[in-house]
């Protein structure tokens, strides 16, 4: 086994386990911590794909900013255990889980059987396209307009968040 | 990867760790002596010559103390929080270049542990993860004062991270690279042949905003609201005792040294000792002098941290937020804009 | 050898776990985090395709997904705070005023 395969298996196992624990834990803070672990595993997977910029941004934006916001809100609302939430098993939930499991099997079947007409080995070019320079030049040439529009989206989100979370409007 | 390469890397890691841990111990002593001097006291001077062994005696005391965990606390997270704090504090130092490369054993060795080509982003990513140590410590203790400290710290760190990142953009534009060793190399020239081309002279506004944001990120006074004693008993570490408290303590001082090293690297020329080329030193001597220069600069920034702590009173919470969002952020954005315009005009 | 298919299956599995979380859980914040998980598994697909095809467009797209995720988290958490202030709960089944 090569180093890449070992790394992939380790990160994939951590990612899947933390994802499962995220949706099964009662305590939202514990769930949030497993999601952070999942983000770190994803960053590792991005590194195995030579996407260094995305890997660091993953930690910086998701683990360092978005999840801090989640943890902050959970702590602010002081949600401890959600036993009060009455999350029992109902036939609806079993049905939902069954349907999604079926969907997963379907996707795996399609992926395994279809001939994916593309090279199955990571090309050497992957190292250059994952750098800050490559993604930066792509963002500022072909995606310049969407990139600028993103700032409008973020401003709208900030204004909306303040408006919604403010106690009283006056 | 050769055996010698691995050995060299290990030697670098050991050296950097020893520097951080010993440096943190010495900083604790320095802080106590300087604060005593400022308050017209003497300070610890009995253990060893001039009190030199005092920090080690303190550590021995902390190790032998009982580790108390509150009954209603979340045991696992309570144990994990100090580890996150100290882990982040130590691993940030990995990308700091503490000297120019030297030629040894027939190979070129860069004097930094991890030579990553996205150094600056790595720095920001680790800083942003560091908040979890304090926040989770506050939450897991199940104590209202600790929780308030944790909440304050996450709000404070998020607010100041923005101006920290933005104030670095000027440096980034001038250097044109994210690698910290190249950023230092760009600073080794001179402006007009006299003034060293350090970023503090090119980016005074960026320097000021970065230093203020660093103070906030390391939870030092005047920004130590997460642990403000008069309001929050002890803040996030109220419920910690023994060596777990010691780890938070160590993390605070290690963070202080690391952020001083980063301020030195980004703005004060790193290991660059100006006007040294004229002396014609042998390469190895030159490298050693440069490492010495780096250490002196870091020590001076640490001293600055300590003097500020014992001179300036703590901000009120609303003042902290107003400063972060209404003063620091516009200043950092203006700095980035101004730098961009100047660079555009020069080019 | 790690192939493109293994990355795609992994990301599909994570997406399905996230989707199940959205369908099954009733705590608004956990539902939210499951949505973040789904967005991230899509990111993994994009990065995997981008690396295997040797084209950086996919990674540029991930950048936009992250921006949208950040905006969505901010607004969504603000909604959760507003709801909690009003009804003292984050249980999605109890937030049913608009349900006829």
Image (spheres, coloured by chain):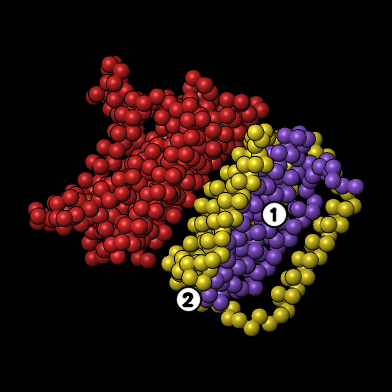
Chain colours: A yellow, B red, C purple
Residue behind mark 1? C35
For residue B148, above or below residue B127: above
| Label 1: chain letter | C
Q: Residue at left 44%, top 54%?
A: B122
Work out how far the residue at label 2 is from the one at label 1, CA to CA, in angstroms.
Answer: 32 Å
Q: Measuring from the top left, give residue A111's x and y in whole percent.
A: 71, 74
**Could you say which quadrant of the image residue A104 lies in?**
bottom right
Residue behind mark 2? A125
* Residue at the extreme left: B279
Q: Is residue B226 left or right of residue A104?
A: left
Regarding residue B59, the answer to whether it shows in the image is yes
Q: Measuring from the top left, give residue B267's x and y in whole percent.
A: 30, 48
The secondary structure type at the circle numbered 1 is helix
Q: Measuring from the top left, give residue B345's x and y in whole percent.
A: 31, 61
| Label 2: chain letter | A
Q: Is residue B340 left or right of residue B143?
A: left
Q: Residue at left 73%, top 61%?
A: C16
Can you tell which of label 2 and label 1 is closer to the viewer?
Answer: 1
Q: Is residue B87 left or right of residue B211?
A: right
* Residue at the extreme top: B41
The secondary structure type at the circle numbered 2 is loop
For residue B187, above or below residue B33: below
Q: Quadrant of the C terminus of chain A?
A: top right
Q: Residue at left 78%, top 35%?
A: C87
Regarding residue B217, the answer to whether it shows in the image is no
């Amino acid at each position: 086994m090569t180093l890449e395969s070992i790394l992939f298996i380790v990160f994939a196992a951590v990612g899947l386990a933390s994802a499962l624990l995220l949706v099964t834990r009662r305590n939202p803070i514990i769930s949030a911590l497993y999601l952070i672990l999942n983000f770190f595993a994803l960053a590792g997977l991005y590194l195995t794909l030579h996407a260094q910029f995305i890997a660091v941004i993953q930690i910086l934006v998701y683990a360092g900013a978005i999840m801090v916001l989640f943890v902050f809100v959970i702590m602010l609302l002081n949600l401890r255990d959600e036993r009060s939430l009455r999350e029992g098993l109902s036939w609806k939930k079993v049905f939902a889980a069954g349907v999604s499991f079926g969907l997963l099997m379907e996707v795996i079947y399609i992926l395994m059987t279809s001939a994916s007409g593309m090279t199955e080995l990571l090309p050497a070019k992957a190292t250059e396209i994952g750098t800050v320079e490559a993604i930066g030049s792509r963002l500022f040439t072909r995606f310049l307009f969407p990139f600028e529009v993103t700032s409008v989206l973020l401003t709208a989100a900030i204004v909306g968040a303040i408006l919604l979370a403010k106690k009283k409007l006056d | 990867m050769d055996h010698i390469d691995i050995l060299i890397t290990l030697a670098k890691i050991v050296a950097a760790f020893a520097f951080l841990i010993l440096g943190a111990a010495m900083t604790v002593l320095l802080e106590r002596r300087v604060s005593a001097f400022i308050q017209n006291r003497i300070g610890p001077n009995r253990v060893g010559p001039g009190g030199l062994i005092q920090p080690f005696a303190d550590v021995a005391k902390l190790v032998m103390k009982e580790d108390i965990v509150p009954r209603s606390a979340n045991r696992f997270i309570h144990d994990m929080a100090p580890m996150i704090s100290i882990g982040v504090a130590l691993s940030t130092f990995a990308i700091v270049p503490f000297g120019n490369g030297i030629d040894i054993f027939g190979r070129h060795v860069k004097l930094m542990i991890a030579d990553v080509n996205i150094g600056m982003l790595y720095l920001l990513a680790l800083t942003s993860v560091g908040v979890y140590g304090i926040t989770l410590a506050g939450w897991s203790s199940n104590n209202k004062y600790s929780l308030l400290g944790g909440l304050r710290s996450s709000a404070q760190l998020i607010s100041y991270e923005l101006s920290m990142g933005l104030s670095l953009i000027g440096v980034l534009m001038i250097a044109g690279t994210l690698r910290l060793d190249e950023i230092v190399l760009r600073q080794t020239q001179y402006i007009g042949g006299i003034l060293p081309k350090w970023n503090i002279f090119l980016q005074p506004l960026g320097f000021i905003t970065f230093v203020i944001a660093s103070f906030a990120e390391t939870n030092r006074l005047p920004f130590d609201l997460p642990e403000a004693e008069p309001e929050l008993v002890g803040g996030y570490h109220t419920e910690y005792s023994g060596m777990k408290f010691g780890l938070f303590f160590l993390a605070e001082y290690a963070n202080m040294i690391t952020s001083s090293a980063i301020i030195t690297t980004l703005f004060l020329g790193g290991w660059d000792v100006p006007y040294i080329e004229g002396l014609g030193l042998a390469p190895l001597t030159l490298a050693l002098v440069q490492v010495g220069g780096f250490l002196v600069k870091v020590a001076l920034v640490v001293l600055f941290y300590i003097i500020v702590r014992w001179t300036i009173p703590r901000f009120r919470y609303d003042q902290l937020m107003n400063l972060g969002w209404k003063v620091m952020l516009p200043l950092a954005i203006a700095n980035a804009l101004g730098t961009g315009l100047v660079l555009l005009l020069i080019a | 050898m790690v192939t493109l298919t293994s990355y795609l299956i992994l990301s599909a599995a994570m997406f399905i776990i996230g989707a199940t979380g959205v369908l099954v859980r009733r705590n608004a914040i956990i539902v939210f985090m499951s949505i973040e998980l789904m967005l991230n598994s899509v990111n993994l697909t994009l990065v995997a395709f981008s690396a295997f095809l040797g084209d950086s467009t996919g990674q540029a797209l991930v950048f936009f997904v992250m921006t949208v995720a950040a905006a969505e988290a901010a607004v969504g958490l603000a909604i959760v705070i507003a709801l909690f202030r009003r009804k003292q709960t984050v249980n999605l089944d109890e937030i049913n005023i608009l349900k006829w």
